[in-house]
Image (tube, grey):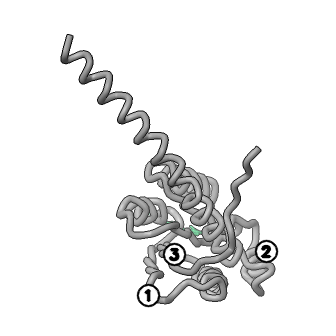
Amino acid sequence: MATIEGTLDASGLRFGIVVSKFNEFVTERLLAGALEVLHKAGAESETIEIAKVPGAFEIPLIARGMARSRRFDAVICLGAVIRGETPHFEYISAEASRGIAQASWESDLPVIFGVLTTDTVEQAMERAGALDRNRGAEAARTAIEMATLMKKMQPRRHKMSSRKLTRRSTLNRSKRKR
Ligand code: INI
């Protein structure tokens, strides 16, 4: 039985971060938490790119663009949607989560959901605190773990597909001979 698992070593990895400016007093703390985790895990500043978007609704488009660019090993999405502040809370949070998941599926890359969805400002601030209770830090840890796990999976995938390719070309050759 084989078990594969990611690690928390970010050295040599490249990260895209999409952070929304809405509720910036919260999201800047999520960003600080994410950066601290990435740096502590060995990521270099030069391999981290940050894109700022107006609100959580705009996160998926930029996350998808970053993921499809193949310039990153993982993309981290950070935002804060607070129910008390908005009547369209449900729409924004649903679109952000759906779009972020879709960006990941479409690009075969970890695109991590680090968007807070809370009832109150107080709850949002609680989840944007020190590293052990900061959603941005947690998202960064998940990004490292998923990126390193994906790297472990790649050789196996390539091996399988090249074997399939060889088989297919052999079949094609024998068909042409007939
Ligand atoms: N965007 C957020 O990220 N959080 C919110 O709480 C929020 N509220 O309260 O409305 C919010 N709205 C803006 C939204 O994300 C879009 O930027 C806007 O609708 C334009 O598309």
Residue 174 lies, in percent from the top left, at: 26, 18
- Residue drawn at 44 percent across, 80 percent down: 49
Tell me which numbered mark, 1 or 3, is placed earlier along the sequence: 3
| Camera-side residue of 113 and 22 | 113
For badge 1, the amino acid type reads: Glu
How many numbered tags mark residues here? Answer: 3
Q: Using the rendered view, name the quadrant where residue 68 is placed.
A: bottom left
Q: 14 above or below 36? A: above
Q: Are marks 1 and 3 in contact (CB under 8 Å)?
A: no
Which mark is nearer the camera, 1 or 3? Answer: 3
- Which SS class for mark 3? loop
| Camera-side residue of 150 and 90 | 150
Residue 132 lies, in percent from the top left, at: 80, 80
| Camera-side residue of 156 and 61 | 156
Q: 56 above or below 32? A: above
Q: 139 above or below 29? A: above
* The C terminus: image quadrant: top left
Q: Mark 2 — residue? A: 123
Q: Residues within 10 Å of mark 2 (few under 14, many from 20)?
A: few
| Camera-side residue of 130 and 176 | 176
For badge 3, the amino acid type reads: Leu
Which disc, if any, is residue 46? 1
Q: Residues within 10 Å of mark 3 (few under 14, many from 20)?
A: some
- Residue drawn at 59 percent across, 59 percent down: 152
Which disc, if any, is residue 13? 3
Which mark is nearer the camera, 3 or 2? Answer: 3
Cβ of mark 3 under 8 Å from ligand 1: the answer is no
Residue 9 lies, in percent from the top left, at: 64, 77
* The N terminus: image quadrant: top right
- Which SS class for mark 2? helix
Tell me which numbered mark, 1 or 2, is placed earlier along the sequence: 1
- Tell me the distance, in whole angstroms, between the alpha carbons under discs 3 and 2: 32 Å
